[in-house]
Amino acid sequence: MVNALATGIASGPMTVSDALLSPLLAADPARPLITFYDDATGERIELSGATFANWVAKTANLLRDECDVEPGAPVAVLLPAHWQTAAALCAVWSCGAEIVADPAGAEVALADAEHLEEAGSAGLVVGFSLDAFGQGLGDALPGGAVDYATEVRVHGDHFDPLAPVPDDTPALAGADVATVVATARARAAELGLSADDRVLATGAWPVATAGGLVDGFLAVLAAGASLVQVRHPAGDQTHRAGTEKVTRTLA
């Protein structure tokens, strides 16, 4: 069976990932979906919709097969606004799990190096180095934790859910799948975003309040737009906006 995210086709109840990504993939899987910059490291990476969907699938397979993430499971996300975070968020939803902010009580926590200690209160920690060249956390990784960078690469490019995820399944900070999707679409309309837009964003993606995550990421997906996400923005972004043919800028 081919993963719905990879084909742009979904049937039956849809996860947040299915609902927001499938239309993008059906329209043009080769179009840039996320262009990521880190001004502190000089990193730039561009992912097409198809490439991003492969990363989502790989991550979802890792979460389900190695971390036992099941529908309804609370998964804490302690990660910055980053292309790997975007893939991780969509992967959690592909598994039918709920994204939460507090690792205490979460079955799994996804955390970068700065938040590994905080993440330790979860049942299992998946550590993200966020390294541009795929290097793992090495000795910085706590005992028993999973190193995302080294483990994700062995997983398949397609994810086949074991069962449909109902619309009333918790998805984000207490909101269910249907609510998250509807909120993202409504916010895209309020912001005036469209499929023709290339959106430059420099803000964080806080999970606890969901507002920044919706405006900075989910609304862009819901509109069918393309995202240029900048971490550690240095100075004025006007030149970059011109180079990347940005049509909209979000604080």
Image (cartoon, helix red, strand yellow):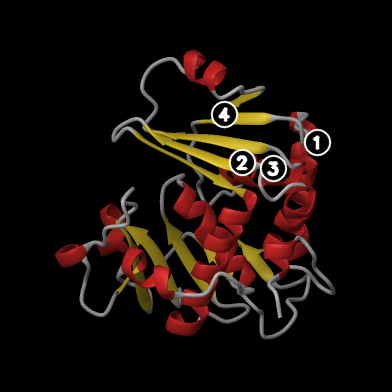
Nearest the camera: 93 or 9? 9
Residue 86 appears at what percent x and percent y?
53, 52
Crowdedness near tag 3: few (<14), some (14–19) or many (≥20) residues, C-alpha within 10 Å: many
Residue 96 appears at what percent x and percent y?
64, 74
Crowdedness near tag 4: few (<14), some (14–19) or many (≥20) residues, C-alpha within 10 Å: many
Q: Say which label, 2 or 4, has the lower sequence index.
A: 2
Q: Say which label, 3 or 2, has the lower sequence index.
A: 2
Name the mark on residue 32. 2
Callout 4, which amino acid?
Leu
Tell me the SS state at disc 4.
Answer: strand
The image quadrant that residue 232 belongs to is: top left
Callout 1, which amino acid?
Ala
Callout 2, which amino acid?
Pro
Q: Quadrant of the N terminus?
A: bottom right
Q: Give the alpha-carbon distance from disc 4 to disc 1, as whole Å.
A: 17 Å
Name the mark on residue 189. 1
Q: Give the alpha-carbon distance from disc 3 to disc 1, as whole Å.
A: 8 Å
Q: Give the alpha-carbon distance from disc 3 to disc 2, as whole Å.
A: 16 Å
Task: Check whether the beta carbons of the residues at disc 3 and disc 2 lie within 8 A of each other.
Answer: no
Q: Which residue is mark 4?
A: 200
The image quadrant that residue 148 belongs to is: bottom left
Q: Which residue is mark 3?
A: 219
Callout 3, which amino acid?
Ala
Q: Is residue 52 left or right of residue 233?
A: right
Q: Nearer the viewer, mark 2 or mark 4?
A: 2
Q: Say which label, 1 or 2, has the lower sequence index.
A: 2
Nearest the camera: 198 or 192? 198
Crowdedness near tag 2: few (<14), some (14–19) or many (≥20) residues, C-alpha within 10 Å: some
Q: Say which label, 3 or 1, has the lower sequence index.
A: 1
Asked whether residue 73 is in view, the answer is: yes
